[in-house]
Image (spheres, grey):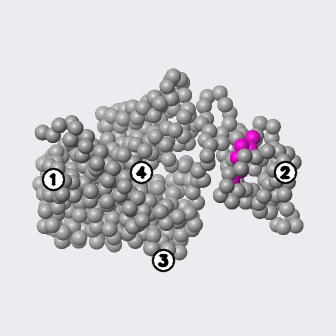
Amino acid sequence: MLSIEYIILYGAALIFLSVVASKLSDRLSVPALLLFLIIGMLAGSEGLGGIAFDDLSLAKSIGIVALVFIIFSGGINTTWKRMRPILFPGFILSTLGVLLTAVIVGVSAVYLLKFSWIEGMLLGAIVSSTDVAAVFTILRSKKMSMKGNITSLLEFESGSNDPMSVFLTIGFIRILMEKNISIVNLFPMFVLDMGMGALVGFFMARFTLFIINKLKLEYTGLYPVLIMSMVLLTYAVAALAKGNGFLAVYIVGLVMSNEEFLHKKSIMRFHDGIAWLMQITMFLTLGLLVFPSHIIPVVGSGLLIALVLVFLARPISIFLCLAPFKFNFAEKSLVAWAGLRGAVPIILATFPLLSNVPRAEIIFNIVFFVVLTSVLIQGTTVTAFANLLKITAPGSYSRVYPIEFERIQGIDASLNDMIVPYNSEVVGKKIFELNVPVKCLIVLISRDDNFIIPNGSMTIEGGDVLLVLANNKDFAALQSSLLQFNKKEA
């Protein structure tokens, strides 16, 4: 057995290589998760590293803990205002869309691979959820975004469709292993799983907000630790209550994203870093777990399922689910093409192995190949496909300022920025001539990629970005005055 020093050495080296590889992924427009998996495979027993790892139970546990924090981070970084217009279609995609994808892939596995019906449905359930984090990494590296609500729809779908895939996977495993369970029994299980998960998630979100605002810890560094404990507690309580722990954790993050609480910015930044660490750890572990020599015999089967998934199951489910909503053909096509598979299917593929399901090893190897194929085909072409469909727009990213403001208890203010329109009435006026509310402070001006500390005699120019410290009412009043346009120019 390796000593702790060697374990730390190997672990640190692999994480370092993964971080460096993430920079390479930006330049090559290749999703970082693919490089993380490759590094793990190269470090494995059949690779250059020669690290022997075949502990399925440990890999599953690592994957579950990692997913808990990744899903929470996705929830807390979701802007509720942006999600509201696509909430219903997003919910349809994350439930019915996942089910349709699973069924189409499952039926294909029955006829193409000669699987039994339940085995086919199990394979379909495992590969039914998406991971579009890689897509947004590519779009950000190219400084692009998508028109309309497509970005928000993909974000919501990717953050909320894992619970349905987990439920279907566990359900079909039970049907295979327990003779007295049938598909009909999945319906009450679904209600309990999702209902209890949502209930626990909501109440734990309110409890977490109450605790973080009332506890008044002496050391600010303990607040992120407190949130970590609450996230893990949420998953455990939901799971023990027969609910969906992943859904509960996502709801906690989603509710917290829409509320103000102590040290919100620093907590979100901390959990963004934790989410990246969890992604790297999870993909490296899964890469170590795979034996490339076992993948080669299933290349044909895996390619068939991957093609069905990418060109048949995903597009059909997207076009059917979005048919009642106002999305055009190009938008639906991009949503269909951006349905990358990620770590969740590989983690779920360990469930049948641990349950000794027949043909579980074949399913695991097929799933791994499907994920690699999906990332290679879709992940490397999504930017070009979006350009081809002409639904891209210049990327809009939050400017990084040299100062920050952390909202704490006892102060009714926040730091926000606003752009001065070129035809605003205030252009050419000095700051002291503006109708600035008494409790509103312009603390910084961004002009031509430079930052200027303002004073009362400074002249406002069109296109200036003002960084303003104020409460919501005063900020809205200042914003309203800046949006008074010069009638001669308008």
> Label 2 to label 1, Cα distance in Å?
68 Å
Q: Secondary structure at mark 4?
A: helix
Please, what is the three-letter code of the amino acid marked with disc 4? Ser
Q: CA distance from mark 3 to mark 2?
A: 46 Å
Span colored in magenta = 441-446
Residue type beneath disc 3: Leu
**Residue positioned most to the bottom:** 388
Disc with the residue nearer the chain's start (3 vs 2)? 3
Q: Give the numbered dot on residue 430.
A: 2
At 28% across and 70% down in the image, what residue appears? Answer: 308
Tell me the residue that label 4 is attached to.
160
Q: Are marks 3 and 1 in contact (CB under 8 Å)?
A: no
Secondary element type, mark 3 = helix
Q: Position of residue 375 (x, y in %)?
A: 33, 64
Look at the numbered discs 4 and 3 and tell me whether their residues touch, using CB distance below 8 Å. Answer: no
- Mark 1 lies on residue: 50
Of the image marks 2 and 1, the number of the one nearer the N terminus: 1
Circle 2 Cα neighbour tier, 10 Å, few/some/many (<14 / 14–19 / ≥20): some
Front: mark 1 or 4: 1
Residue receiving disc 3: 388
Check the image and report above or below for 173 versus 341: above
Q: Give neighbour class at mark 4: few <14, some 14-19, many 20+ (Cα, 10 Å).
A: many
Point 82% across, 45% down: residue = 456
| Tag 1–tag 4 contact (CB < 8 Å) | no
Q: Is residue 450 visible?
A: yes
**Disc 1 on helix, strand or loop?**
loop
* Mark closest to the chain's N terminus, 1 or 4: 1
Query: Residue 286 at x, y = what percent?
Result: 24, 52
